[in-house]
């Protein structure tokens, strides 16, 4: 068991999908990552910030799951980061209706003293300078730094993002972002190019089409579970990253073979996340359900040669 | 080893991709299906038609590969079916520049007498009434009738298409076509609906995202091999179908587990097809190369649970 540092947003989301809409509910990258990683009973700390409007029971819920919340800063006279979005009919695109940074605008991440030697660092989607700030606080070089990011930072803070990319071991981005970052259409060529920027491992997320893990000349393809319906995709990418990081922190094995398994766990957890609004399904997920789904993933792609 | 009947076009194609363009070269669904199936040294017959302008050496090449060409009709005073298309920069869409039916307009398929008891029938993409005509000539009920079709027939001959669909065991279509045929966005729901129309097995092709095989409540996901570059996608779907049908004809095992392997063989063969213009790569494909690529497919998705 390795220690895990998670940095990312803890937020309110308001979501509209073809199935319905929500008021402000619990959301944020670090929240989804923490919920997914806590399935593995990891020793993890959440580094984030919320406002005085953030319900104390949400923090208690995260703490109950074994997550250290001492560096989840509460700015009593501030408001929590808020995001609101509406998904298209086929769930493949979404419009952002509102983004209120609030307390996130002045966020200075502080890694708890006893997590500065953590072996695994999960940098959730956030301004690259905040992600860099976390890496710089580590007193011992982590075994694995995992970066999740998105096109928004490529558009608005590319220089900062490149500095972070240079310092991480694993990057997780989606297919369109990999193409944007490299100018290459082929994901094989794009992944190769990204490896020259820093990361030894490149994970390309393709939503309903699964995810690809690249390392040197090797490729692993994790399918997505074909689903009857996707209820709410919010947090699926964060959950995927959290399952990946959590499994690796639990096992402490950072080999390519173990990264494959971590991707499968991340995919399985993400397949639960989309079944309900926001964090609802993740909060109520049982160990046995997860195990059964992992078996489903295995049977989905396994075949015997003669 | 089971006998295999293949019906489909034998044609001239003129292709333009970002990598170059060709004059009239060998193409057609039955051609690609036959080339793929012949990798398994099947006892197969091609049922099709060409004009007097069709080079005799192409027919000899197919015969050399062990394919029965006695029902590849040559209309000496007619012209061979011609298709011309241009692919977009990312190869994901193509415009048809020309379609000249020529001898195909009056084609009456004739299954050779000694193939009327074939166990496997592969209905390549063609007018559904021609496909139906082949099924009706079989004197013994085949073990497996496989149908490949496309949106063109859904738009122009849906009633006829539905009659064929009712009579087949396996249908292979792409994701958009599955959605069009059923009005369902979820591929899981779409596949279920298609199974109520006739087929016991539904194969949904997703191009670079692989293929899904559905049977009752089971799903198998065959990845596509991530490629550095796709040179020419023409014939990839037919090659996939031909590899699938050929492997099943060779093994004579029509269980779900064996259909999984057949999909992998189809995917592996299709991954070669796109490496060169037209049939070039398939004509020159060796047994050992295919075996190595099958191993690559295996390592692409296989993982061990703890």
Image (tube, coloured by chain):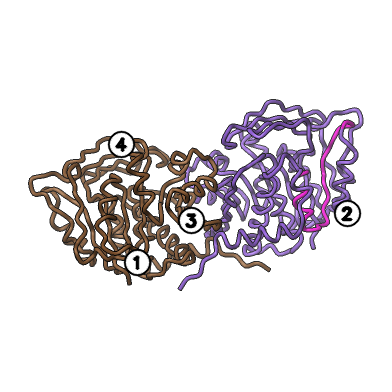
Chain colours: A purple, B brown
**Chain for mark 2?**
A
The disc, 4 or 1, on the residue closer to the chain's N-terminal end is: 4
Are discs 1 and 2 less than 8 Å apart at CB?
A: no
In the image, are marks 1 and 2 on the same chain? no
Q: Which of the two marks, 3 or 4, is nearer to us in this view?
A: 3
In the image, are marks 3 and 4 on the same chain? yes
Q: Is residue B53 left or right of residue B89?
A: left
Question: Which of the pair B57/B18 is nearer the observer?
Answer: B57
Q: Secondary structure at mark 4?
A: strand
Residue denoted by label 1: B249
In the image, are marks 3 and 2 on the same chain? no
In the image, are marks 2 and 4 on the same chain? no
Q: Which of the two marks, 2 or 4, is nearer to us in this view?
A: 4
Q: Is residue B201 visible?
A: yes
Q: Secondary structure at mark 3?
A: strand
Taking the spot 52% from the left edge, 57% from the top edge, the residue there is B216
Cα–Cα span, label 4 and label 1: 33 Å
Question: Which of the pair A77/A162 is nearer the observer?
Answer: A77
**Chain for mark 4?**
B
Residue denoted by label 3: B213
Q: Is residue A63 above or below residue A40?
A: above
Q: Position of residue A259 (x, y in %)?
A: 65, 60
In the image, are marks 3 and 1 on the same chain? yes
The disc, 3 or 1, on the residue closer to the chain's N-terminal end is: 3
Q: Quadrant of residue B106?
A: top left
Q: Position of residue A219 (x, y in %)?
A: 54, 58
Residue denoted by label 2: A114
Cα–Cα span, label 2 and label 4: 64 Å
The disc, 3 or 4, on the residue closer to the chain's N-terminal end is: 4
Residue pushed farthest left? B77
């Amino acid at each position: 068991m390795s220690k895990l540092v998670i940095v990312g947003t803890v937020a309110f989301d308001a979501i509209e999908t073809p199935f319905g809409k929500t008021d402000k509910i619990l959301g944020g990258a670090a929240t989804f990552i923490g919920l997914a990683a806590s399935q593995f009973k990891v020793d993890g700390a959440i580094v984030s910030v919320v406002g005085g409007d953030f319900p104390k029971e949400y923090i208690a819920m995260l703490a109950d799951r074994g997550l250290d919340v001492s560096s989840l800063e509460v700015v009593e006279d501030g408001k929590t980061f808020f995001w609101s979005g509406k998904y298209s009919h086929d769930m493949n695109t979404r419009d952002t209706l509102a983004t209120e940074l609030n307390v996130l605008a002045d966020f200075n991440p502080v890694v708890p003293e006893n997590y500065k030697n953590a072996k695994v660092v999960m940098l959730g989607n956030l301004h690259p300078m905040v992600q860099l700030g976390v890496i710089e606080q580590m007193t011992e070089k982590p075994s694995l730094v995992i970066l999740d990011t998105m096109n928004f930072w490529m558009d608005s803070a590319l220089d900062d993002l490149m500095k972070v990319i240079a310092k991480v071991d694993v990057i997780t981005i989606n297919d369109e972002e990999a193409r944007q970052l490299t100018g290459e259409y082929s994901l094989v060529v794009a992944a190769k190019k990204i490896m020259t920027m820093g990361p030894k491992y490149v994970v390309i997320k393709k939503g309903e089409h699964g995810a690809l893990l690249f390392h040197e000349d090797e490729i692993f393809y994790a399918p997505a579970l074909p689903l009857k319906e996707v209820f709410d995709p919010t947090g699926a990418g964060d959950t995927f990253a959290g399952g990946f990081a959590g499994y690796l922190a639990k096992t402490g094995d950072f080999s390519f073979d173990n990264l494959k398994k971590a991707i499968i766990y991340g995919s399985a957890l993400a397949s639960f996340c989309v079944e309900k609004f926001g964090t609802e399904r993740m909060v109520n997920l049982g160990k046995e359900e997860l195990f059964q789904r992992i078996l489903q993933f295995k049977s989905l792609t396994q075949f015997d040669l003669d």
